[in-house]
Image (cartoon, helix red, strand yellow):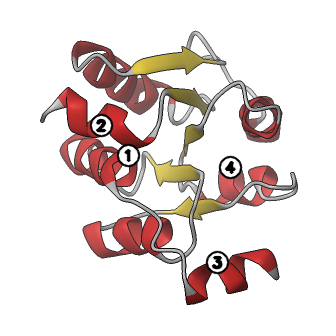
Amino acid sequence: MSNSKLNKIFKTVCIASDHAGFKLKENIKNHLIKNNVSIFDVGPFDDKSVDYPDYAKKLGFRIKLRKSDVGILVCGSGTGMAISANKIKPIRAAVCYNLKSTRLSRQHNNANIIALGSRLTNTAISLKLVEIFLKTKFEGGRHLRRIKKI
């Protein structure tokens, strides 16, 4: 992976999880740090039981306040985190589970958070999905009109 490609679109990436996603969050974070991606971790910092909406909100508000450009949320399925984050305007969190869903979430929906399920997606695939998410540009055009309607 070329870090220059990852850093072209987004300067700062925020990451968070719940207890179910903690191990995968740490693997993603370490992978990105090794590739010179600026990461801000809002927690948790161990695998003790926590409530995922708290961490989705921490990350979502960081993006809303423009302290981070995009975010990565990890829980058991990705769904709870995405639902929680999407309550915050202007968050567009997408549960991504394969290459195509990830690419389209950026190209067509201008997703600013990728939500991953640690119980559904293994580490190797998750790392690839994060790379695609960070490298893929929003296409704009007719998609921008639709985004504005959300």
Residue 101 position, x and y percent, is: 39, 73
Between disc 1 and disc 3, the foreground one is 3
Mark 1 → mark 3, Cα distance in angstroms: 19 Å
Q: Amino acid at mark 1?
A: Leu
N-term mark: 4 or 1: 4
Quarter of the image for residue 130 reads top left
Question: Does the image show residue 47?
Answer: no
Residue depicted at x 26% and y 23%? 31
Q: Earlier in the sequence, mark 2 or mark 4?
A: 2
- Residue on which disc 2 sits: 6
Are the two marked residues, 2 and 1, in contact with CB atoms closer than 8 angstroms? yes
Question: What is the total number of numbered labels drawn onto the structure image?
Answer: 4
Kind of residue at disc 2: Leu
Residue 91 image position (x, y, % from top left): 75, 54
Determine if residue 29 is in view.
yes
SS at badge 2: helix
**Quick one: label 4 or label 3, which is nearer the N terminus?**
4
Q: CA distance from mark 4 to mark 1?
A: 19 Å
The span from disc 3 to disc 2 (Cα, nearest Å) is 23 Å
What mark, if any, has residue 81 been given in the picture?
Answer: 4
Answer whether labels 3 and 2 touch (C-beta < 8 Å). Answer: no
Image spot of residue 131 (x, y percent): 28, 45
| Relative to 134, 52 lies left or right | right
Seen in the picture, residue 123 relative to 14 is either above or below; the reply is below
Disc 2 to disc 4: CB gap under 8 Å: no
Residue at 39%, 57% in the rendered image:
120
Type of residue at label 3? Leu
Specify which label sits upstream in the sequence, 3 or 2: 2
